[in-house]
Image (cartoon, rainbow, N blue to C red):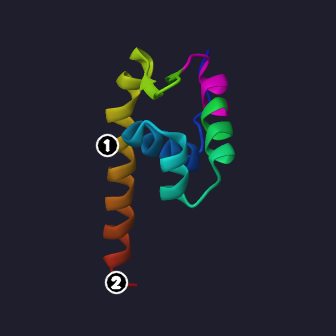
Amino acid sequence: MQTSLPSLDVLKTFVVVAERLNFTHAAQALHLTQGAVSRQILGLEQQLGYPLFSRRARGLTLTPQGALLLAPVQLALDQLAQALAKAGEQPG
């Protein structure tokens, strides 16, 4: 069974949270509330069917699945941004 792709906004949120390992700091960087970021990550985890983060009293850590997913998602978002920039430079 193929999983539908998550939205780009949710994937971006995942990357920002993974880089900061803190919902509050990620929310500040994304100009969202901490609750909105937490709900996006929870929704992503539910969509995928596995946790991406371990929630601890002192913050977050990536699960093995989250760590495996991080680099490819970062690369895909970077490639998309580069393609959009390149396309925008084309005349006409």
Percent coordinates x, y for residue 74 in the rendering = 35, 42
| Secondary structure category for the residue under label 2 | loop
Residue 49 belongs to magenta span: yes
Q: Is residue 66 left or right of residue 7?
A: left
The reply, left or right, for residue 40 in relation to residue 60 is right
Q: Residue at x 68, y 47 (%)?
A: 36
Q: Of helix, strand and loop, which mostly describes the magenta segment?
A: helix
Of residues 48 and 22, the one drawn nearer to the viewer in this rendering = 22
Q: Which residues are magenta?
A: 43-51
Residue type at numbered disc 1: Leu
Amino acid carrying label 2: it is Pro
Please name which of the two marks, 1 or 2, marks the residue nearer to the observer: 1
Residue drawn at the location 39% of the way across and 64% of the way down: 84
| Residue that badge 2 annotates | 91
62 lies left or right of 3: left
Q: Which residue is mark 1?
A: 75
- 7 in relation to 43, above or below: below
